[in-house]
Image (spheres, helix red, strand yellow):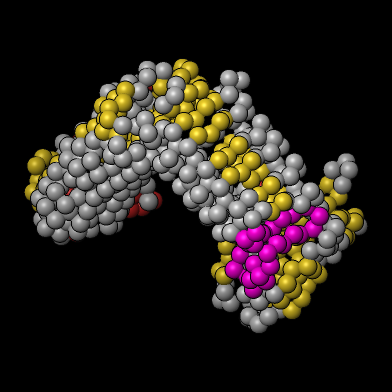
Amino acid sequence: MKKILSVCLVLLMALSVFSITVSAEGVVSIGYYDAKIGDLYYCFYEDEADTVAYVVGYEIDADNIAPAGAITVPKTVTYKGEEYTVVGIEDEAFCMSLFTSVTLPSTITYIGDYAFSTCDYLEDVVIPDDCKFNYFGLNVFTTTPFEAKIYSKDETIFGQNVLYSYIGSGNEYVVPANIEIIANHCFFMSGIKNVILNDKIEEIPAYAFASCRNLKSIQIPDNVTIISTGAFKDCSNLESVTLGKGVSRIGVEAFSNTKLKTIHLGANVYDITGAFKDCKTMESITVDVANTALITDGSAIYLKSSFLIGGLAGEDGLILEYYLPNKAQGKITIKSAVKAIGAYAFYNCKDLKEVSANKILYVDSNAFAGSGIEKFSGNSALIIFNNAFRNCNNLADVSMDSAYYIGDGAFKYCTALKNVQFADDIYYIGGESFANTGVTSITVSGDECEIGEGAFKDCQELKSVRLEDGVETVGKNAFLGCPELETIYISKTVKGFDENAFNGCENVLFQIIDGSRGHKFIKNLGYDFETVGRLSFLERISAFFENLFSSLFGWI
């Protein structure tokens, strides 16, 4: 019995509901398609100039996992009497197929992410030399035998304009003049010492030069607008980078773990979030005077911004994007114009001791992660995002009594952190947000507050927990691995419990309100408890009907 295997690009999936169908024969993924022609499934598009088709999937025999032989994608297909030119292979279109060879037509201009990935028998993909691509996706041939063939050659070029890989170790490589697209990981771990880019390339893609440890300098041409995630990560001898005038965005870890000491950001640069993470040798960054987005005071780079949420709605201010490691020492007072601390701003700054900030809207992901900070003072941030202070082993004093959102892993492994005071209106304490900290007792009230999975997991010194009015749900393993925990008080407002919310709390004494949901939940678990209050008559009536409707209709 034949089945359809089809995986679509996000854009196409938006046109239809993506579903998973499970049958006796196996699991079959069915995405959006317009028609099956031959062994392939297509989507069709029309505009005033073109009628084009994209391959979105293929037909396989689910009961036969033997190699399926070769297949040729046609130049044109006819659908409802209209001829369409086949121009694209969508994301994952041939993913996990059994074909041994795929031949593409010269009309192909688009190959999506993971288009041929995980094809165990795919030995060859024939791409005509006259193909000219406008997009060549991420990890197109990953985990295929064909990928091994590609990496057996120093240089692989597809069609007229795609440099897919270069793994040679020559002193210098000049990117051919016809190349317009460099694939991600193109030069990854190559031994190249110098690369000269042409004036047609517009993007340095993800991890394109990562781990090129012989690369000492690079000049980015003016036509390049984007330097993507990890582009030069772990180029451990890279000392000099000249950015072209067109660069506007530099991705996370783009220059992580390099030997850069200084860099100049041009007039168009506006996004450098995490770009210089782990640049321990960085001494100075200058910003072009014509740049209207970024400014510097010699110690840090700031992004001009308008804030539209929280108590700062409508205010203009600055986001502290990056603090130079050699300046991030001792105590730092954040200037009043700064309204947020950006992702990775103080990442791994080991000599940092204290930061004082006033009226901060948020501390972004990994802002202080791995740093030596001991105290975060001043008016608390309203939002503390994921991993913001993760692995800050010296952090003992942090002001968070205004924070209404604390993200996942925000303070994980802050082993010196013992005293925590939560805001009265907090509504989220994230998964593992305080895991492996030194907290000894916690009291949470909040505003319909959710305590995430493993929020206080492995807190070795935690002895008492009070979940007051305003706490609504407790996630899985919230207090797992807390050997000193003696009591947990559960307010009558706590209504939602993961079935494993109190894993590891078998020896804890629960303090509960008679008649509450917490009472029922702990009683059903068979855990030790004492009642420290009871619902009023009206509350009991309300609880009765809530339980009734919940039993009958699944209402809460």
> Would you identify the image quadrant in which residue 522 lies?
bottom left
> Would you identify the image quadrant in which residue 147 lies?
bottom right
Residue 101: give x, y in percent of width and height.
74, 73
Is residue 403 shown to the viewer in this render?
no
Count of numbered badges drawn on the protein: 0
Query: Which one is in front, 22 or 419?
Result: 419
Query: Which one is in front, 68 or 257?
Result: 257
Q: Is residue 364 left or right of residue 444?
A: right
Which residue is drawn at the image coordinates 47% and 37% (left, top)?
A: 261
> Would you identify the image quadrant in which residue 433 lies?
top left
- Tell me: residue 305, above or below residue 506: above
Residue 258: give x, y in percent of width and height.
48, 46
Q: Quadrant of the N terminus?
A: bottom right
**Segment tinted magenta in the rendering:** 142-170
Residue 59: give x, y in percent of width and height.
71, 71
Is residue 20 shown to the viewer in this render?
yes
Q: Is residue 219 left or right of residue 132?
A: left
Residue 50: give x, y in percent of width and height.
87, 47
Which residue is drawn at the image coordinates 70% and 75% (left, top)?
A: 123
Q: Quadrant of the C terminus?
A: top left
Which residue is drawn at the image coordinates 53% and 34% (left, top)?
A: 263
Residue 493 counted in the magenta span:
no
Which residue is drawn at the image coordinates 88% and 41% (left, top)?
A: 48
